[in-house]
Image (cartoon, rainbow, N blue to C red):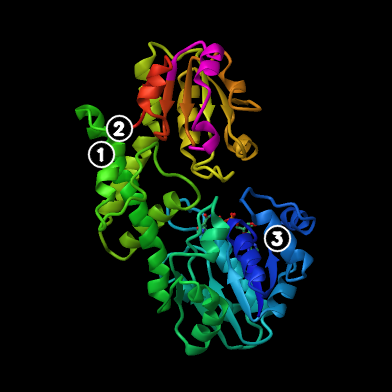
């Protein structure tokens, strides 16, 4: 099939490369000409394991190409995915300007029946706005369908998530659109990944409902972690015991420094806005958000409590991205924590295996090291903010020689507290 993808970011590029790898002819379109130029040269602008190889293979076999020419992209395809960003707007609701700009371009250059598939995360009922925008932009009336196909991939395991998803959600209101979408995804069904067909509105809501629930689990555990600390329970054991209940399950029960990233914060905000706009209460999600905002500062407060004064102290930070295996710094808790440390007068030295370049754009007062041990020299304390594998089994003896202080704050609960204490450090985790 001939497919175009508008927006070549984390989602559009992964979707485009994977759909090309299924044998489709895919054109990825982006307004960012620097990004498209890099992609044409085989340079991948984001860090995502396996993506470079997949793009190279499918480009070489001429199934995948890149352009800034939206007219060419629209005319060449029967199916057009919209995968542009939907950042948080000023009032917290999703900013749909990119989605609607893409819809206007599609309408303008449409030369025959098209299926317009919304893969961006958008508030329920956005399909109506897209439909209206396309119609208004058409030179002559041409038939089209708007489908909702929300994306659930996670950065860091995006290719695996796209090709082996827990489920594929397709919201379509016509038989024609359903049948074409089924053809795109049917190989996944054969490998045991179910396709769920719904109406467009339900599909749009499934994405926000899923992220809202996952964020709720994290905030629930973070709040419980405070009770663990005051009573002496260990939140990791509590999570393990809870997670074995099949009705609960083990995932997303880790206490830590709060959720971040490009999805949960803005999607929770957008869902709160939609609930309110529809005259519904949003109490649970409002609490989820408040807990998350407070949790981001929890580690900085622990550090303040552990040291008489932070003025002039040198603090080492391991990990900046909002989670491992990505360079995405959007809403990373590290931003809030480092800002709090700077305000308290600390000098922050940080290392992250892939996110330092993107961090430079959002963090001002930070010095970067070239490896984890580099930033420990004369450090009064170490904060672990992202659970990269390479931080999991450090050489504590080497750390002791380098650091002037003996404090480790483990914001991701990756260490065994006893082991760290035996190595001669003061250990502070979250909820243990
Ligand atoms: P991104 O910011 O990485 O990429 C968006 C791309 O769209 C950018 O390259 C931008 O230049 C391009 N763009 C903007 N307007 C355009 C236009 N009019 N025409 C062509 N290109 C345009 O965003 P992302 O992380 O890939 O997210 C895309 C959508 O998918 C969002 O709605 C997001 O919520 C959702 N989503 C993201 C993830 C994730 O993990 N990143 C997971 C699931 C869903």
Q: CA distance from mark 3 to mark 1?
A: 43 Å
Q: Residue at x 53, y 67 (%)?
A: 119
Q: Answer whether labels 1 and 2 touch (C-beta < 8 Å).
A: yes
Q: Where residue 258 sits in the image (x, y, percent)?
A: 39, 40
The boundaries of the magenta stretch are 387-407
Residue located beneath label 1 in the image = 224
CA gap, disc 3 and disc 2: 42 Å
Q: Residues within 10 Å of mark 3 (few under 14, many from 20)?
A: many
Decide which of tag 1 and tag 2 comes sooner along the chain: 1
**Whole-number angstrom distance, CA of label 1 to CA of label 2:** 8 Å
Is disc 2's CB within 8 Å of ligand 1? no
Q: Position of residue 267 (x, y in %)?
A: 42, 55
Q: Nearer the viewer, mark 3 or mark 1?
A: 3
Label placed on residue 55: 3
**Tag on residue 431?**
2
N-term mark: 3 or 2: 3
């Amino acid at each position: 099939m001939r497919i175009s993808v508008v927006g070549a970011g984390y989602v559009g590029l992964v979707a485009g490369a994977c759909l090309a790898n299924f044998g489709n002819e895919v054109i990825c379109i982006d307004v960012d000409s620097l990004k498209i130029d890099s992609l044409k040269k085989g340079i991948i602008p984001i860090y995502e394991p396996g993506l470079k190889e997949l793009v190279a293979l499918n480009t070489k076999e001429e199934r995948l190409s890149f352009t800034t020419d939206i007219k060419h992209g629209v005319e060449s395809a029967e199916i057009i995915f919209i995968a542009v960003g939907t950042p948080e707007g000023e009032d917290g609701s999703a900013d749909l300007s990119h989605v609607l700009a893409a819809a206007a371009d599609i309408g303008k250059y449409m030369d025959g029946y098209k299926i317009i598939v919304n893969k961006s995360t958008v508030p329920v009922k956005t399909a109506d706005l897209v439909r209206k925008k396309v119609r208004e932009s058409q030179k002559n009336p041409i038939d089209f369908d708007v489908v909702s196909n929300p994306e659930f991939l996670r950065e860091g395991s995006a290719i695996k998530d796209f090709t082996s998803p827990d489920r594929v959600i397709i919201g379509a209101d016509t038989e024609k659109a359903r049948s074409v979408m089924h053809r795109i995804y049917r190989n996944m069904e054969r490998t045991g990944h179910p396709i769920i067909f719904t109406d467009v509105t339900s599909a749009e809501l499934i994405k926000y409902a899923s992220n809202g629930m996952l964020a709720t689990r994290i905030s629930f555990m973070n709040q419980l972690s405070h009770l663990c600390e005051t009573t002496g329970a260990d939140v990791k054991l509590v999570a393990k015991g809870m997670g074995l209940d099949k009705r609960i399950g083990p995932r997303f029960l880790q206490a830590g420094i709060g959720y971040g990233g490009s999805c949960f914060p803005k999607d929770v905000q957008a869902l709160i806005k939609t609930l309110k706009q529809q005259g519904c209460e949003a109490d649970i999600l409002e609490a989820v958000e408040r807990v998350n905002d407070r949790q981001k500062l929890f580690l900085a407060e622990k550090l303040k409590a552990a040291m008489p004064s932070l003025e002039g102290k040198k603090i080492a930070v391991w990990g900046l991205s909002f989670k491992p295996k990505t360079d995405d710094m959007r809403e990373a808790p590290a931003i809030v924590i480092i800002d709090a440390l700077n305000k308290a007068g600390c000098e922050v030295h940080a290392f992250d295996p892939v996110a330092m370049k993107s961090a430079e754009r959002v963090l001002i007062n930070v010095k970067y090291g070239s490896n984890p041990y580099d930033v420990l020299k004369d450090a009064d304390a170490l904060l672990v903010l992202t659970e990269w594998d390479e931080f999991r089994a450090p050489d504590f003896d080497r750390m002791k020689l380098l650091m002037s202080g003996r404090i480790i704050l483990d914001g991701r609960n990756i260490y065994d507290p006893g082991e760290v204490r035996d190595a001669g450090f003061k250990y502070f985790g979250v909820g243990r």
